[in-house]
Image (tube, grey):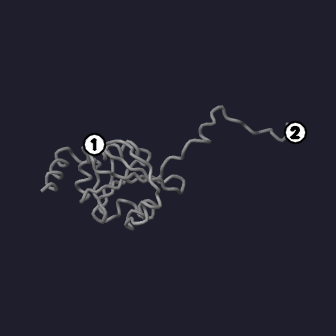
Amino acid sequence: MSEDDLDGIEIPDDLSALTAAPTPTVAVVVTQVAVAPALAAACSLAGVDVDAVPSPVGALAVLRDPAAGVPAAGAVSRLLRQVPVVLLERRAGKVAASQWVGGEHEKDLPAGLVLSGAPEVLEELLLGDLPAGEVEGVVSSVGMSRWKAMRLLAAHRR
């Protein structure tokens, strides 16, 4: 190979982009919260922007900003104290799963096992086949007032 073959090739000073993990395109926090309005209210109080989607296994927090998955999973798991939540993130066509308890990352989980018994709505959300806003019963935490969030939480504790 001669020097002429390398003309026009530029080597960047910062190569970190070659090894950095791709940004998530979808992030969902799977909870055991029974109803979507209660999860949306809790997320609103925690300052986490989600669309809370009902599912047979518990409400799902679909993050408005998928890149905020880690801090959001920590915040949601802090709210739910000792009840574990699972963060599912889709990056470059691959799904990663992690378990969170009390605001802390506990362990990474095999995504295939987590999804093996998952409800169809979760799979459709992760694959991007179904926008969260189109799911029946979805409740957004965005723009929810503190007063409304407190009323929703009180109503669902009964």
The answer to whether 128 is drawn above or below residue 20 in the figure is below
Label whose residue precedes the other's in the sequence (1 or 2):
2
Instruction: Report the quarter where the N terminus lies.
Output: top right
Of all residues, the one furthest to the left in this rendering is: 158
Please, what secondary structure does the residue beneath circle 2 have? loop
Circle 2 residues within 10 Å: few <14, some 14–19, many ≥20: few
- The amino acid type, in three-letter code, at marker 1 is Ala
Q: Which residue is identified by label 2?
A: 2
**156 and 65: which one is in front?**
156
| Residue labelled with disc 1 | 46
Callout 1: helix, strand or loop?
helix
Residue drawn at (48%, 56%) of the image: 95
Asked if labels 2 and 1 touch by Cβ distance under 8 angstroms, the answer is no
Marks 1 and 2, how far apart in space?
60 Å
Q: Residue at x 66, y 31 (%)?
A: 13
Measuring 59% from the left and 40% from the top, which residue is drawn there?
17
Residue 16 falls left or right of residue 135: right
Q: Is residue 96 left or right of residue 50?
A: right
Residue 131 location, quadrant: bottom left
